[in-house]
Image: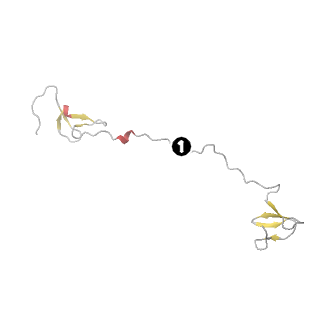
Amino acid sequence: MGRENFYKPGSFYRICDRTGFAIRSERTRMEWNNLIVSDRVWEARQPQDFVKGVNDSQNVPYARPRSPNPTVGTSLAPQFQSFNNPGASSQFEVQNGQIMVVKAASVVTAANFPKGF
């Protein structure tokens, strides 16, 4: 069909913002972005435009600072006792990764560590 070149009371022509054709006003619609377009090329607003984000709080509830390393006994180095011999007990002390005998002057290493533990 060609252009409707006749008088119609209450009607007028509009230019479609998308196609550029002259169209009667009753055959046009306004889109959400204020474009006046033909009924044939009219598009609804994308539903994803209405989606709202959800708050995703990743905070730790009841956060506390890290506690200091615990110490055993009154000295700063951890100590333990070996009860190998029923009559005499030996005390050992760990310093810098080495085990030292407190009551004697020798250093105990992994090679000469007492058996039975």
Q: Position of residue 20 (x, y in %)?
A: 20, 40
Answer left or right for 110 relative to 47: right
| Quarter holding residue 95 | bottom right
Which quarter of the rendering shows the N terminus?
top left
For the point 76% across and 71% down, the residue is 110
Q: Within the image, what quadrant is residue 22 found in?
A: top left
Residue closest to the far top: 9
Residue 78 position in % (x across, y down):
78, 59
108 is higher (above) or lower (below) than 13: below
Closer to us: 93 or 87? 87
Q: Where is residue 54 in the image (x, y as percent from the top left)?
A: 47, 41
Q: Quadrant of residue 97?
A: bottom right
- As drawn, the residue found furthest toward the front would be 86
Instruction: Check disc 1: other Cα within 10 Å, few if <14, some if 14-19, many if 20+.
Output: few
Residue 81: x %, y % from top left: 82, 62
* Position of 7 relative to 74 (above/below): above
Q: What element carries label 1?
A: loop
Q: Which residue lies furthest to the bottom in this view?
A: 111
Q: How many labels does the image show?
A: 1
Q: Residue at x 72, y 52 (%)?
A: 68
Type of amino acid under label 1 = Ser
User: Looking at the image, which is closer to me, 56 or 88?
Assistant: 88
| Residue denoted by label 1 | 57
- In which quadrant of the rendered image does the C terminus lie? bottom right
Taking depth in this image into account, of 45 and 79 the one nearest to the observer is 79
